[in-house]
Image: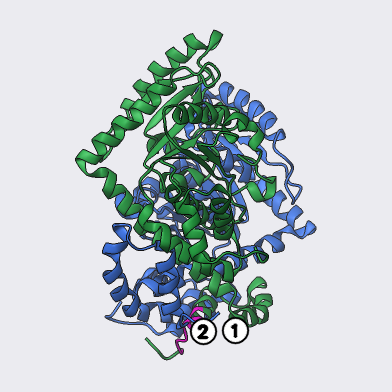
Chain colours: A blue, B green
Amino acid sequence: MTKNRLSSSDYIQGILQGDRVILSRAITLVESALLSDQLIAEKVMEGVLPYSGKSIRIGITGVPGVGKSTFIESFGKMLVESGHNVAVLAVDPSSQQSHGSILGDKTRMESLAVDKRAYIRPSPAGNTLGGVSARTREGMLLCEAAGFDVILIETVGVGQSEITVKGMVDFFLLLMLAGAGDELQGIKKGIIEICDAMVINKADGANLESAKIAKREYANALHLFPSKENSWNPQVKICSALENSGLKEIWEMVKEYQERMIINGYWDQNRSNQRVNWLHEHVRYLLEKSFFQNEKIKNQLDQILPEITSGRLSPIAKARELVDLFTGKSKGDK
Amino acid sequence: MTKNRLSSSDYIQGILQGDRVILSRAITLVESALLSDQLIAEKVMEGVLPYSGKSIRIGITGVPGVGKSTFIESFGKMLVESGHNVAVLAVDPSSQQSHGSILGDKTRMESLAVDKRAYIRPSPAGNTLGGVSARTREGMLLCEAAGFDVILIETVGVGQSEITVKGMVDFFLLLMLAGAGDELQGIKKGIIEICDAMVINKADGANLESAKIAKREYANALHLFPSKENSWNPQVKICSALENSGLKEIWEMVKEYQERMIINGYWDQNRSNQRVNWLHEHVRYLLEKSFFQNEKIKNQLDQILPEITSGRLSPIAKARELVDLFTGKSKGDK
């Protein structure tokens, strides 16, 4: 980033012209931990913001082995071939340890990766989900400003990351396999509750019949969940990413969802809520960061830590003292 | 609390004498949202801290229907009858909505509730897990200072609360039923990974045989998990809370765990780590609270919120401005 540094207006101009190289550099800038990069990144974000938001954002989850990469590749190919520009992003807080467990290896989506109408970006590294998700959101807005009208956000089917992705997309899709019980797929009830559709993948060859049976069973099971405030009943679809079957039906379902949500007002309401939550999340993230990087706090922590670990000092009382020190409040203040 | 207000030293003295009424009032004080109460509560905590920490802290989880209350009642009775003083607390972030879904109704543990050697306290109300857990931790220390040498912390078998409870106990016990598959019990793999023992409850009558089979199966399954840093292999036990069978074996297992962990140093190391995490958690909680209660921030938020929800302003840039405003940093600062 230091060599050949671009100004914020260079970035903005390049992105709005759909320049891939500059888009990639802007995402790298957004992901940078350097404060100087972040300040430019914020200006870039402000500049592109009016041009963002015009895509359909789809979250895709499912446990390892369910065929997420193959599904995204086939689904993405179908979309670009019908005239869309598709960006694929990922939220994977484990990617730092595993060096990009999802989307890290673009060769898994070879034919989509080389398509000019598609753009694939692996998960930003990071050890907190908050940091990873903030960066992915910004990457999403940058891609939108660069002209991508469908954003696919992949995440792993375990942990908190689905909730995070649900909080940044319009439509949330859960990939499943027929035959394997829920317990084998490691799918938690909580994920089923937040999905807008379940898609049974690998419905081909000998699996086709069991996929159809599973579809009926899941559809029945979904009826047991309380209906959602947006009055959308989650759908169950089957598809084969290998045979390219069922993909158009999934896209039509997403389009139908969009139409209905725009009419009943939920589309905008959901995005408004997401923006407020995003502000709150980022506030929490920055507060914590600026606290633990504060020199006075670091010194104080070094001093008291042995007495905290030994149990001689109360963490509760010390937390308040530290926070008061940080916010410049004296002990006597109310 | 306003009438007949006690000083912090009244509280401390009462607690150290094992006065139940004062212990209950101190816990209420700790749970109070009023800053004036919290400041007294912190003094009380500081005063009792040197007398706390001498108990065995056991976390107990399991989905609704597994028989947690009956188990805790029988296990607690067995403990008091063998000379222990037992306090039962709960962590249930849903209790505000559901008006105390666990431990709210002491009549579920009628015979333990009336026993002078036991003390039962429902989950503090609260809409954030952070707030609920901080208050439960403090309640735990107060109970220890009041002379309780076994603390049982109950939590619901769904969501994040197990991780929270795991972070405040020495031993974590997962209650299960035989026959029901994992999927029916809603148990997530993550919970199985963090437990120190699985106990198959209701192993009586016609269930006894299936409980024995389930014990073998779970024991085999647990072998598949990587071994823990403390070199403890999680045990599987069966018990009947109704018939009072298997309870002594569970207690002996906990005692064996304690002995081995004290010898290998993990007991103290775990508690040290918990105290540091507790400090960090409480810092996060207080930072966020003091931020969103700050008058300048509230005014600013009111002003910008319409432009955030509409997408005209960037949540990321505004979050930084708000945090800078809060920490008193001007825009030009590093």
* Residue B329 belongs to magenta span: yes
Q: Residues within 10 Å of mark 1 (few under 14, many from 20)?
A: few
Secondary structure under tag 2 reads helix
Q: Are marks 2 and 1 in contact (CB under 8 Å)?
A: yes
Drawn side of residue A96 relative to residue B205, left or right? left
Please, which chain is the residue tagged with disc 1 on?
B
Front position in the image: B295 or B46: B46
10 Å neighbourhood of mark 2: few (<14), some, or many (≥20)?
A: some
Residue A137 in view of the camera: no
**Quadrant in which the N terminus of chain B appears:** bottom right
Q: Residue drawn 70% across and 54% down?
A: A258
Q: SS class of the residue under badge 1?
A: helix
Position of the C terminus of chain B by quadrant: bottom left
As drawn, A204 above or below B48:
above
Q: CA distance from mark 2 to mark 1?
A: 8 Å
The image shows residue A315 at horizontal and vertical percentages of 40, 62
Marked residue nearer the N-terminal end (2 or 1): 1
Magenta stretch, residue numbers: B323-330
Q: Position of residue A42 (x, y in %)?
A: 47, 78
Say which amino acid is labelled 2.
Leu
Mark drawn on residue B296 = 1
Tell me which amino acid carries mark 1.
Lys
x and y, in percent, of residue B283 in the image: 44, 66
Frontmost residue, A52 versus B79: B79
In the rendered image, residue A184, in percent from the top left (x then y), is placed at 47, 29
Residue ID for mark 2: B325
